[in-house]
Image: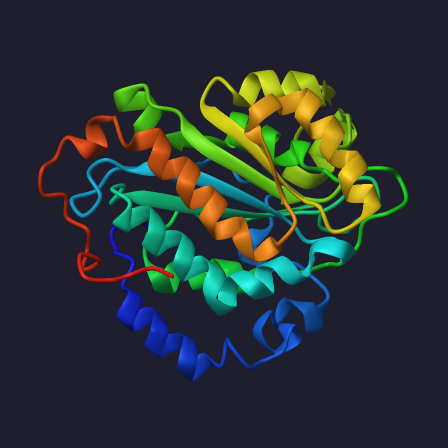
Amino acid sequence: MGGTRYDMGARDDRAKKAGYASKSVSEIFTQNSKRMAHPSMNPNGIVFREARDSDVHPNSVPIILGLDVTGSMGHIPHELIKDGLPKLMGGIIQGGVPDPALLFLGIGDHECDGYPLQVGQFESGDEELDMWLTRTYIESGGGGNAGESYLLAWYFAAFHTRTDAFEKRNQKGLLFTVGDEPTLKILPASSIKEIMGSGQQTYTHLDLLDEVKKRYDVYHISVLHSDQAINADRGWKELLGQNCLSITDHKEIPNVIKDIICERFKNSDYSKNDNPDLGGFENIQML
């Protein structure tokens, strides 16, 4: 974790061999056929996920990407494994942030779903990131309860992550959720205990947003592919203001995230190195 680089050439070769561009969701995301989350992504018992510096990545930038894996959004992980993830990582590195550490979360509905939260690890290498993404169980659940559990991403980031960026440099990480529904507004202690293995306090979404903002800049990407999503977007804008980013084409997700991260760091210490080590990206032209 944190000791490997994102290698576009190796990733391209592996993607061709794995058939990411041609295989179906069920062929790539093999947990779907098992109808259960991968044991390594079960958050029950997790104390912390850590984004630490290393010799390869001395200025790690923690990035959390919470993907809605309910019915209307389950196609997004498939698009990411086909070509969105290399566009995202390549764009971030080429844009002047050489040490991204990305953590995937799978987000469902804690009131309805069997697996409302799935958790990867902070990773920088192409092979590791593909592994965590394809381990995600696209449960395709959710319910008619006017929301999904995006607040679980805030809970986990606030209470179950540790980063050198914050502890050593007082730099916040970046947290993105992607979806088309409002967030559910109450996270009961009973749900936390069931999901995490322990929990004694009930939180509102505003409680958790305040907590996570202490260590992360929080964004939500609204995918406006229905009237319901457009209505949800209004609520997100009231909640997050300009940190709610609205798109009509889900394929823009990597570009939106990349632009925010690169803009955030272009005037920071990351850009003061005249010759940053881009890990082989110097001559790569992103689409």
Q: Quadrant of residue 264?
A: top left
Q: Is residue 274 visible?
A: yes
Q: Residue at x 22, y 58 (%)?
A: 281
Say above or below: 28 vs 88. below
* In this picture, residue 15 sits left or right of residue 57: right
Camera-side residue of 27 and 115: 27
Left-right relation of 124 to 160: left
Residue at 59% x, 30% y is 154
Left or right: 231 in relation to 33: right
The foreground one among 36 and 172 is: 172
Q: Is residue 106 above or below residue 79?
A: above
Residue 113: image location, x then y, percent = 79, 49
Q: Is residue 13 left or right of residue 239?
A: left
Instruction: Quadrant for the C terminus, please.
Output: bottom left
Residue 270: image x %, image y %?
A: 22, 33
Residue at 64% in and 67% down: 31
Q: Which residue: 29% across, 72% down?
A: 10
